Amino acid sequence: MPSFKKYRLNPETLLYEIEKVSKKTHFRHVAAVVLSSLLMMCVYLWVFTRLLGLDLPKTALLERKNSEWVARLEQLNFELDRSESTLEGLRLRDEQVYRNIFGLDSIPLSVRNSGLGGLKRYVGLEGLDDRSLLRTTALRLDRLTKKTYIQSKSFDDISAYAKRADDRASCIPAIMPINPDPTTYRRSSGFGYRTDPFTSASKMHTGYDFSCPQGNPVYVTGDGVVEEVRFELRGYGNSVLVNHGFGYKTRYAHLRNVYVAEGMTLKRGECIGETGNTGRSSGPHLHYEVIFRNSYVNPVNFMDFDMPEPEYRQMVEQAQAQSQNVILRTGQRIRR
């Protein structure tokens, strides 16, 4: 610390002599100067911030940077609004048009609207208020990323089904499950509510019944895979459930004999069993159901009662020939 000397006039010698100042007094002087400076600085800050309403230079710089980031986040949210609107249009077309065309089930909104999540995904946002612009923007971007991924996977599924569009016509159940010769069967009960033959109560009948003698051949009504074969004393009795893809399934119930097994691939017109009187049945008949996207539909809408019997027989013979060729080539099907 530099040494400050103070001179005083000696009246006796009329000379200026160095005034001796104690260290204690010198320290008081220095402390007074420092305190005065601090006081002036506080007064300056008070006048600058309180009276004039101005920010400190560093605070002003931070405020300016914060305003820039807020503007960027607001612009990002505007872009997110546009992206969500576009994605919602794609979702509606996907659900109402594309997935319906190919018989695909809808994707639940709970799945579409879920975020990516993860235990440590939002650690950096824990200190922010729930209404913070940064937090809400991050969560919106997260959900939009998940929605985009799910929509992309949905289009992948549709693309795969579109490549199989030529197969759709042969997979949809479109013929009668028995020979259309009217002398071999009788239409006994249609689809809809009817009086139950056992309880006499009104009950929904989920299929279509063909009364005919036991042993009448039963044919699969569209290309598909045997999903389930059951042998029960009640209910459907001996039954076969075929999955045709594109949302379609068919069931053939109360059979006497079953000629197929689960996992077996079938072509339209192949014989899968014989009519019988098994399960909860009031007489020999075939109970035939069409299921579309897990809902029972009227089989009449999928049957051609006017198909000529020779044409039907020719189709059955061709299916039988194809089946035999597959057996000889792969040996993977069941011999009947």
Image (spheres, rainbow, N blue to C red):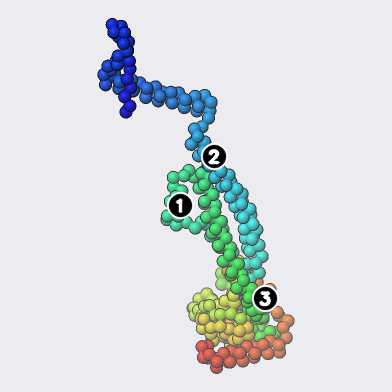
* Quadrant of the rendered image containing residue 169: bottom right
Name the residue located 56 percent from the left edge and 80 percent from the top edge: 225
Label 1 or label 3, whichever comes before in sequence order? 1
Cα gap from disc 2 to disc 3, whole angstroms: 70 Å
Which circle, 2 or 1, is nearer the viewer? Answer: 2
Q: Which residue is mark 2?
A: 64
Residue 195 showing in the rendered view:
no
| Most foreground residue, 79 or 184 | 79
Name the residue located 60 percent from the left edge and 86 percent from the top edge: 270
Q: Which residue is mark 3?
A: 302
Q: Is residue 288 left or right of residue 234?
A: right
Which circle, 1 or 3, is nearer the viewer? Answer: 1
Question: Which label belongs to residue 290?
Answer: none
Location of residue 80 in the rendering, given as x and y in whole percent from the top left corner: 59, 52
Label 2 or label 3, whichever comes before in sequence order? 2
SS assignment at label 3: helix
The image quadrant where one finds the N terminus is: top left
Location of residue 44 in the rendering, given as x and y in whole percent from the top left corner: 47, 25
| Most foreground residue, 207 or 282 | 207
Label 2 or label 1, whichever comes before in sequence order? 2
SS assignment at label 2: helix
Q: Which residue is mark 1?
A: 122
Q: Is residue 230 left or right of residue 193?
A: left
Name the residue located 28 percent from the left edge and 6 percent from the top edge: 12
Image height of 58 relative to 331, above or below: above
The image quadrant where one finds the C terminus is: bottom right
Residue kind at label 2, given as amino acid type? Arg
